[in-house]
Image (cartoon, rainbow, N blue to C red):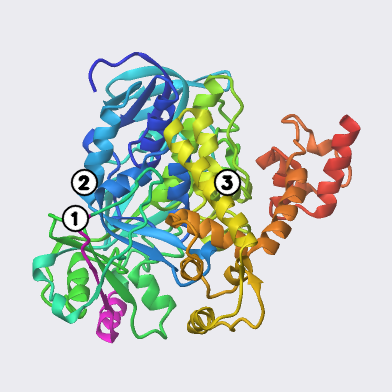
């Protein structure tokens, strides 16, 4: 934060999870980068619950790490509990999640950015953009004035025209106790961007000293920890439990009796909220047949003493929040240290962006995070990383990085936003990913670390570990295919314990591993010559063996889809000149300007016939 230049290659606006990943990736790629944020001490601050990962989100974090981002490393160094979700289900559904120390995570990220070469941090508010001939030339800051750049990345989070609601009271703010950014929102509207509103919220915080933990169910972390970062070899940490309680009929009655004081149900809040993480008011009204809703008391940190009651996000008045909390088992005498609140904020229609996250209206302007219509730290970090990389690549005059849907969760995230848009805060789920068995969180390194190395964001040492993993898996697959096991009392006893049929004739060891309930550890007890494998190697080997036929079919399907995605549509195509397209389809194609025939086919309402007509037109154009 010392001497600042008057001109930069890239300026990043906002120091949240998107902004910090954008800043770090750009600076590490050798670009002179400036991060403009309202408060440097709030870089990487967790506005909502103190946790990273989760269903569909753990995959994003692993992919960011494989490409060379920071979120996974920060999580490993500040975590206080690790859990592998869906561990009893198939490999495609497994997702890592970690409780983190909120303060430690914030401090780690702040240190990382302040010490990063090629990166300056400025405490100020960006109020406008410098533009000329359809190109973004920099930003205008409230105190510092004009700062020029070759590219700018907006990562404004909930600060863009943020409005906080507590009961029927509302006031401007990006977070409780922090200012919002209203002038930048007005500037975007003036420049012709389609700006709309979304809503999210958070829970009241509770003093742990006032909680009766003896009446709650403890939820401990995993005994065997799988770190988030592929560069973390092993973790030894003090894990602390979360606790489970639930709402009851009395809680629901308190909420229903006070809906006339809720900004959600009196029309004060008009924006769409998060469908998959609704407020407790929404849960009680929409799911009125349910007698209770689960609440997870998540520790804010090792030294904090505060707990985050995940499951009761609310914008009800403070006195109603207190009555609601006191009606819950274990929280009868709980003291609220900070009230929950709802917040409305502006976002820009993501269909106005290319797949690189660059604006179609204003060259050199990129957007990432909640300004794209997403919700969640992980989605924001993934978008920020990609925006930083693509802005850097454009300045270097190198080919942009666009990940395919079959290549990464990040590819699905971006493709859905820029192709379909969103009218509610978008959250990533495994169910959104059609090739999820092939792009799991455990193989993010083999899928993406080569790309990270090429970008200069992954070290040769880290990449060598991927090559070693691949070599070890191939070696063991060959060995399993070469070893024949004869029926014996010892072997059949093991198979029966695993609830699978005993052997009646000699079979290859690989055939035994193909069985549903048999793991690599099981067959290691049968054949002593098998080498010990790491967690990631074991999972890769088991998936390769058990799903060999499915993987081959899916890979063939992906090749077919990639063919249509490889047919690029020139930027200047005049869709009005293509005979046979309906006005509705023409309008959608003109608005989204798909980069390929594959993206055009994924636009809602664009028919197969329309895709064929575009293809014929492209062939005619040569």
| Left or right of 61, for residue 144 | left
Q: Are marks 2 and 3 in contact (CB under 8 Å)?
A: no
Reply yes or no: does residue 252 show up in magenta: yes
Please tell me in which quadrant of the rendered image residue 342 appears. Answer: bottom left
Q: Earlier in the sequence, mark 1 or mark 2?
A: 2
The residue segment tinted magenta is 237-258
Quadrant the N terminus occupies:
top left
How much space separates mark 1 and mark 3, taking CA atoms? 33 Å
Quadrant the C terminus occupies:
top right
Q: Are marks 1 and 2 in contact (CB under 8 Å)?
A: yes
Crowd rating for badge 3 (residues with CA inside 10 Å; few <14, some 14–19, many 20+): some
Which circle marks residue 411 in the picture? Answer: 3
Q: Secondary structure at mark 3?
A: helix
Which residue is denoted by mark 2 in the rendering? 104
Reply yes or no: does residue 31 show up in magenta: no
Up-down relation of residue 27 to residue 87 (above or below): above
């Amino acid at each position: 934060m010392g001497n600042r230049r008057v001109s930069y290659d890239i300026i990043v606006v906002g120091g949240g999870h998107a902004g910090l990943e954008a800043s770090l990736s750009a600076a590490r790629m050798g670009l002179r980068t400036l991060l403009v944020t309202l408060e440097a001490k709030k870089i990487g601050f967790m506005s909502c619950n103190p946790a990273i990962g989760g269903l569909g989100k753990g995959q994003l974090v692993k992919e960011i790490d494989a490409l060379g981002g920071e979120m996974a490393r920060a999580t490993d160094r500040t975590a206080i509990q690790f859990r592998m979700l869906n561990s009893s289900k198939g490999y495609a559904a497994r997702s890592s999640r970690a409780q983190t120390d909120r303060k430690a995570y914030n401090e780690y990220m702040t240190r990382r950015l302040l010490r990063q070469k090629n990166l300056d941090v400025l405490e100020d508010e960006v109020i406008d953009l410098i533009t000329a001939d359809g190109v973004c030339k920099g930003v205008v800051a409230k105190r510092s004035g004009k700062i020029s750049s070759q590219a700018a990345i907006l990562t404004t989070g909930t600060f863009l025209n943020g409005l906080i609601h507590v009961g029927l009271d509302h006031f401007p703010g990006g977070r409780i106790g922090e200012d919002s950014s209203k002038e930048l929102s007005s500037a975007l509207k003036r420049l012709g961007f389609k700006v709309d509103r979304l809503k999210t919220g958070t829970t009241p915080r509770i003093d742990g000293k006032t909680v009766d933990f003896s009446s709650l169910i403890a939820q401990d972390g995993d005994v065997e920890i799988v770190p988030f970062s592929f560069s973390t070899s092993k973790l030894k940490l003090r894990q602390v439990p979360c606790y489970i309680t639930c709402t009851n009929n009395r809680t629901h009655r308190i909420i229903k009796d006070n809906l006339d004081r809720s900004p959600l149900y009196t029309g004060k809040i008009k924006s769409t909220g998060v469908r998959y993480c609704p407020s407790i008011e929404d849960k009680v009204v929409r799911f009125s047949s349910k007698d209770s809703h689960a609440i997870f008391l998540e520790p804010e940190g090792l030294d904090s003493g505060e707990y985050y009651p995940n499951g009761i996000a609310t914008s009800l008045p403070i006195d109603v929040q207190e009555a609601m909390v006191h009606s819950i088992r274990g929280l009868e005498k709980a003291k609220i240290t900070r009230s929950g609140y709802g917040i409305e904020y502006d976002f820009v229609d993501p269909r106005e962006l290319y797949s690189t996250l660059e604006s179609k209206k204003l060259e050199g302007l990129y957007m990432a995070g909640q300004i794209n219509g997403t919700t969640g730290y992980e989605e924001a970090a993934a978008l920020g990383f990609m925006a930083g990389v693509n802005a850097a690549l454009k300045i270097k005059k190198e080919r942009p990085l666009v990940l395919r849907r079959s290549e990464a969760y990040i590819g699905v995230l971006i493709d859905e936003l820029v192709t379909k848009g969103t009218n509610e805060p978008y959250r990533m789920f495994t169910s959104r990913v059609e090739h999820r068995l092939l792009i799991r969180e455990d193989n993010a390194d083999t899928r993406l670390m080569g790309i990270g190395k090429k970008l200069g964001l992954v070290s040769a040492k880290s990449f060598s570990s991927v090559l070693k993993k691949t070599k070890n898996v191939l070696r063991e697959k060959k060995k399993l295919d070469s070893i024949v096991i004869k029926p014996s009392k010892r072997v059949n006893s093991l198979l029966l314990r695993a609830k699978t049929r005993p052997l009646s004739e000699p079979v290859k060891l690989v055939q035994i591993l193909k069985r549903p309930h048999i793991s690599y550890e099981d067959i290691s007890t049968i054949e002593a010559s098998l080498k010990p494998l790491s967690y990631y190697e074991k999972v890769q080997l088991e998936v390769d063996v058990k799903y060999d036929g499915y993987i081959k079919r899916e890979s063939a399907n992906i090749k077919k889809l990639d063919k249509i995605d490889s047919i690029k549509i020139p930027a200047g195509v005049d869709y009005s000149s293509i005979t046979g397209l309906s006005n509705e389809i023409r309008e959608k194609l003109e608005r989204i300007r798909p980069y390929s025939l594959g993206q055009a086919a994924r636009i809602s309402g664009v028919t197969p016939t329309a895709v064929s007509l575009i293809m014929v037109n492209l062939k005619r154009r040569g």
